[in-house]
Every structure is written in C-alpha cells, then in structure tokens.
Image: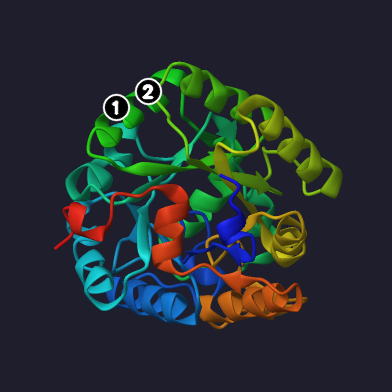
C-alpha cells in the first residue's frame, strides 16, 4: 500500500535457507536449527525486517516440514529479535500440502509465504557442476527436479488461506509468473485476501518468468492494473546472479526487496556469500545510495497490517 509516510523506506526480507539449494552447494548454507537461528538473528541485526524460514533435517540438511524441527529454532528467534517471522507454506516440491502447512498451522506466525499457483521448479542443471555430494539424498533430489511440480492448485491455495488466515496470519504472495497475479486477483475478488497484502514477484526460476527487466515492468504494471496501486506492498526476488540487479531495480521503482541464501548462494561473480548477512548488508548499501532506509520490523508491521508477534503461538 503506497504511503507518503514510508516513501523513503524499503522492507528487506531475508530468506535464510530455503529448500532447493543443498549442503554440497555451499558450506555456508545453514541447515541445523542452531545455524538457522544464528543466521536469522544476524540478518535481523543487519537490517532485515522479515525473516523467511524453512526447516531442514539437522543431520542431513534435507528439507522437512516437521513442526518439531521448527520448534528448535523459532522460539530462539522470537525471543532475541523483533523481526517478523515468516514461515514457508511451500516447504519443498516433494511435500504434500498437509506436510507443508503443519508448522505454520501449529505456530500461527504473523506471516507465511504462499505460492499463488503451480509451476515446474527445476534446478537439475546444477547437478552437472557437482562431482562429490555430501549426502546421498542430494544428487537424486537435484537431478530429479526436472520432474518437480511445485503444486498449489486453487484448492490448495483456498485450503491454506482458510486454515492459516483464520488465525490472523497474512501472506507473502509469491508470484512466479503473470498468471499467478491473476490467481491472486481471483482470491482478492472472493474476499479471501484483503488489503493491504504483500506481493513477492519472483524471477529467474527455471519454470517461472525469466529475469529480464521488461518482465519486471510488466509484472508491476499488471499488478497495478489488477489491484490498484494503493492496495498492496510489492517486493522482488531473483534467483542466483540476478538477485542484486533485480533488487536494485525494484528499489528504484519504489518496491521492497528480498535477499538470502535461499535465493542465491553468491555475493558477487564467482564468490560465495559467507552468510546471509553478506547479502543483507550489500542490499542495505545499495538502498543507502538511493537515499532509502531499511524499514524497521515495527514499520513493516504497520505497512502490512500484521497482527504482531505477541499474537502468534511461538513461545
């Protein structure tokens, strides 16, 4: 939602681990609950107002939707930072929807991510660059992504909205292509989504819209036409080497930004990021050059009309 009050502010979301990158791809990818908590707290301290969270098997780094694993790091994050906790409902393409929302249903966070449609979601080309894998599951998972369908049907989306929305949770509406904006408009028209809402436009995933600036412009223009400029906040994430250029372009256009090791393992050409903080600090420097400031968690809550950390089940 546009507001003169926040015209010089940009919400930084940090997605600290995700489900698609695997431990072999970077030694810096947080996998254990302690690592996820540490990275989340550091990202918040560096300027991220929203922390987007997945869980991983502490022994192998494999994605999991087990609430018991989330419980090993969510309370520590809530206790030590006022950043907004945002739990995935995407989980992994290998999970059924019931598994994907088990954690959010238990903890009723302020925010959850919500893919606004199904799509092919592939990272299999990365397997060609890796000879030795740390864990047996990784190679099959990465190569098998050529057959992954990241499912979110209209029925799935309605189920998630009804299950979590009744507890006051709001959503990071992840739109991987133009059609996902129209899906969002459908649920808005039905009253299952109410302003202000948060649109995360996603570029550069193999299976989604490509990382060209013309596509970013078209997605923003389409969203404005469908929703009206004053009903929503918008943000951009881009995969891999497109992360910072697209975040920069979004900020130039008055949008918000998402970074983190879920979306890119790099900090520059040929150089792995050593932490999520590397990326948060880099985008913060870029924002500063535009005379923009990171929104505080309190400001992000006001911009997105969130229910507040005290109204969650994280304890």
Residue 19: numbered disc? none
- Residue 77 rendering spot, x and y as whole percentages: 28, 71
- Residue 282 rendering spot, x and y as whole percentages: 65, 79
> Looking at the image, which is closer to me, 98 or 217?
217
The quarter of the image holding the C terminus is bottom left
In the orientation shown, which residue stands out farthest toward the front? 4
Q: Is residue 272 above or below residue 238?
A: below
Q: Is residue 175 visible?
A: yes
Report the residue marked by disc 1.
Answer: 162
Q: Is residue 132 visible?
A: no
Q: Is residue 313 above or below residue 294?
A: above
Label 2 secondary element: helix
Marks 2 and 1 sit apart, C-alpha to C-alpha, by 6 Å
**In the drawing, does residue 216 fall left or right of residue 298?**
right
In the orientation shown, which residue stands out farthest toward the top? 190
Q: Badge 1: how crowded within 10 Å, few (<14), some, or many (20+)?
A: few
> Looking at the image, which is closer to me, 24 or 119?
119
**In the drawing, does residue 269 fall left or right of residue 201?**
right
Residue in the image at 66% along x and 58% along y: 126
**In the drawing, does residue 196 fall left or right of residue 176?**
left
> Looking at the image, which is closer to me, 143 or 62?
62
Residue in the image at 70% along x and 55% along y: 254
Residue in the image at 64% along x and 31% along y: 228
Label 1 secondary element: helix
The quarter of the image holding the N terminus is top right
Q: Are marks 2 and 1 in contact (CB under 8 Å)?
A: yes
Q: How many marks?
A: 2
> Looking at the image, which is closer to me, 302 or 201?
302
- Residue 241 rendering spot, x and y as whole percentages: 74, 64
- Residue 156 rendering spot, x and y as whole percentages: 39, 25
Report the residue marked by disc 2.
Answer: 158
Looking at the rendering, which quadrant does residue 45 occupy?
bottom left
């Amino acid at each position: 939602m546009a507001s003169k009050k926040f015209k010089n502010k940009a919400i930084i979301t940090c997605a600290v681990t995700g489900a698609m990158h695997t431990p072999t791809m970077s030694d810096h990818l947080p996998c254990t609950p302690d690592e996820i908590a540490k990275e989340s707290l550091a990202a918040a301290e560096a300027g991220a107002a929203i922390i987007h969270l997945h869980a991983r098997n502490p022994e192998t780094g494999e994605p999991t939707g087990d609430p018991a694993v989330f419980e090993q790091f969510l309370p520590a994050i809530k206790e030590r930072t006022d950043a907004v906790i945002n739990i995935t409902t995407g989980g992994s393409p290998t999970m059924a929807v019931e598994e994907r929302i088990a954690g959010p249903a238990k903890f009723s966070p302020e925010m959850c991510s919500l893919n606004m449609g199904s799509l092919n979601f592939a990272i299999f080309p990365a397997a060609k660059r890796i000879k030795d894998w740390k864990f047996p599951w990784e190679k099959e998972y990465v190569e098998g992504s050529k057959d992954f369908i990241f499912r979110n049907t209209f029925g799935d989306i309605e189920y998630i909205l009804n299950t979590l929305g009744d507890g006051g949770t709001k959503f990071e509406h992840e739109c991987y292509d133009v059609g996902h904006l129209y899906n969002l408009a459908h649920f808005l028209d039905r009253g299952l989504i109410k302003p202000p809402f948060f649109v995360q436009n996603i570029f550069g995933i193999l299976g989604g819209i490509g990382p060209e600036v013309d596509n970013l412009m078209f997605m923003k223009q389409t969203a404005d036409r469908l929703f009206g400029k004053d009903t929503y906040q918008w943000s951009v994430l881009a995969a891999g080497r497109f992360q910072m250029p697209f975040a920069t372009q979004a900020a130039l256009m008055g949008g918000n930004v998402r970074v983190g090791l879920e979306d890119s393992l790099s900090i520059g050409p040929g150089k792995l990021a050593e932490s999520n903080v590397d990326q948060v600090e880099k985008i913060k420097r870029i924002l500063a050059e535009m005379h923009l400031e990171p929104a505080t968690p309190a400001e992000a809550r006001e911009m997105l009309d969130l229910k507040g950390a005290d109204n969650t089940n994280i304890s």
